[in-house]
Amino acid sequence: MTSTRVHDLAHARSGDKGNTSNVAVIAYDDAGWQRIRQHLTAERVMAAYAHLAQGPVTRYEVPNLRALNFVIEKALAGGVTRSLRLDPHGKTLSAIVLGIELPDD
Amino acid sequence: MTPASRNGNSVRIGVGAGMADDRIAPGVQLLQTSELDYLVCECLAERTIAREQLNRRRAPDGGYTPMLEERVRAFAPLCRDKGVRLVSNMGAANPLGAAKAARRVAAEVGVQDLRCAAVTGDDVTELLRSHPELRLLEAGAPLETLLPRMASANAYLGADVVRDALATGAEFVLTGRVADPSLFLGVAMFHHGWSYDDLPMLAAGTMTGHLLECSVQVTGGYFADPGRKDVPRLAELAYPFADVGRDGSIVIGKPAGSGGRLDRMTCTEQALYEIHDPARYITPDCVLDITGLAFEELGPDQVRVRGQRASARTDTLKVVVGYTDGWIGSGEVAYAGINAIGRARLAADVVKERFRLDGGKADEIQVDLIGMTALHGDTGRAQDRPEPYEVRLRVAARCPDRKSADLIGDHVRQLNMQGPYAAGGPVNLGAREVIAVDAVLIPRSWVKPQVVVLGGDQ
């Protein structure tokens, strides 16, 4: 089975609110949208962030924008002002989702 | 691009800043080139107001955004010349002090008697002291648990305060805590005479504000991925503006031929930025639903926005509570060449041990190998992380007192004599006091905003 990285299909941006990070994943085209919609599950995303975030992860769909929005709770080591992390906003967290490998249909 | 503004049916709102220390030049460019009606500067991050409260305690005239004076110096003459009115939350913990400073600085650059409105009333610190029962949204505990350490409590005010402040005829409106999109919606409500019954209009103004509040994030900032998502002339990113029609139509634009990009992709990323449930984005003015959102590229620098919806505002206002929460100290040192990672890990262990031996107290110590584990953590799978040739060790500690926070960095600093071989460039990055934030919800009726006008024909 071959695989595709999310980076090949989509772009992403992360934002912070308190101790929660949201990672929006936006497909470049309809084919990419079908792939991420089917395979980029909340479980897959939780697994990729498990060493950094306690979760849970909630997935929202915005089909009109070909976008998935993942809300990852307890992901920012206490939030921007308390965090001991080098990137307390979690600005780099969007790069993790783009590295996830998806199976073919 | 057709100038849509000043034809009576549309208002052009430009962006002058998307964060407290954002660039000034693109705001000047917008004022010079783009026939704005209003300039909005969003300058208050979640944590900023608590820091400014502490500054104000040290200097009662201060407590507003540090770059306010520089911004007023650059923007006031152009605003006066072109009849552009400025709206900003640069007042932070001291809107009235900010208005006085703005008038003084404006006069220095030849803008006499600037009519400036200050919006106060977001500060509910004293009010909350008599409501220890309020529940903290993040911690889940009662407010009482952190009352002794509370440094600030500010309610997110809505667009109505901006609308009312503009109705006084003020050229500049300076607020404290107002929700970011509300700064923009308030302008549109005032200009078009919209009310809180006009839900499609509230949706349009809030959507505009959400797309514009982070300045260049909608024109190619925070976007480039070379070879995949290229941004032309990234160094010259332009700030955006929006033409908001009386009928709720929205077109996002940027100066013709300016740097950056504005298209469906940049708008989509910004639309979802810091959003949780896309069907329920709660602001003080409405609950926004962007699940039906659509972007249409009208030209290289023009995107039409459609499909946002809103339901009525909630009965409560969100209050951000800032409280002191100990100290953070940190230090860094570099290793290179053969076994760099092994020496860095050994150094981290020895720093932690010496910190303990010297009586340092920490609730939590974080070790980062920059270039290896710092940003995306340690997955524990060696095959994920080929060893870099060089690595920078960072040790950070959360401490109950300043002395311990200083001590952790001292130990990292001393590694160039006392650590594994070839420890280079060690620094103690010092201690900082932590202002943590949480939030509570309060009934709207508890908050009594006021508008104070300085100057003009008062």
Image (cartoon, coloured by chain):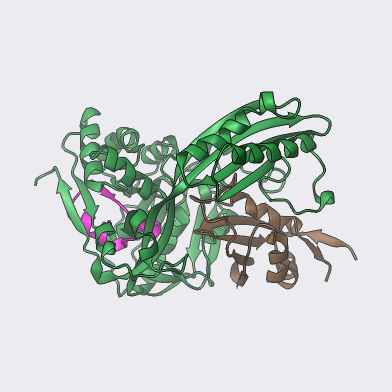
Chain colours: A brown, B green
| Residue A20 falls inside the magenta stretch | no
Q: Position of residue B163 (x, y in %)?
A: 25, 59
The structure residue drawn at horizontal position 59% and vertical position 52%, both measured from the top left corner, is A90
Q: Position of residue B424 (x, y in %)?
A: 69, 25
Res. B184 image quadrant: bottom left
Res. B230 image quadrant: top right
The structure residue drawn at horizontal position 34% and vertical position 36%, both measured from the top left corner, is B71
Decide if residue A100 is on the left or right side of residue B248: right
Decide if residue B388 is on the left or right side of residue B252: right
The structure residue drawn at horizontal position 61% and vertical position 29%, both measured from the top left corner, is B413
Residue B304 or residue B137, whichever sits in front:
B137
When the figure is inspected, residue B101 is found, relative to residue B381, above or below; the finding is above
| Residue B168 falls inside the magenta stretch | yes
Res. A61 image quadrant: bottom right
Residue A62 or residue B118, whichever sits in front:
B118
Q: Position of residue B289 (x, y in %)?
A: 48, 72
Residue B65 or residue A60, whichever sits in front:
B65
Tally of marks: 0
Using the rendered image of the protein, determine whether residue B82 is visible from the camera's viewpoint.
Answer: no
When the figure is inspected, residue B242 is found, relative to residue B33, above or below; the finding is below
Using the rendered image of the protein, determine whether residue A27 is visible from the camera's viewpoint.
Answer: yes
Q: Where is residue B7 in the image (x, y as percent from the top left)?
A: 31, 55
Q: Residue furthest top?
A: B417
The structure residue drawn at horizontal position 38% and vertical position 54%, both measured from the top left corner, is B322
- The magenta span reads B156-184
Q: Residue furthest left?
A: B458
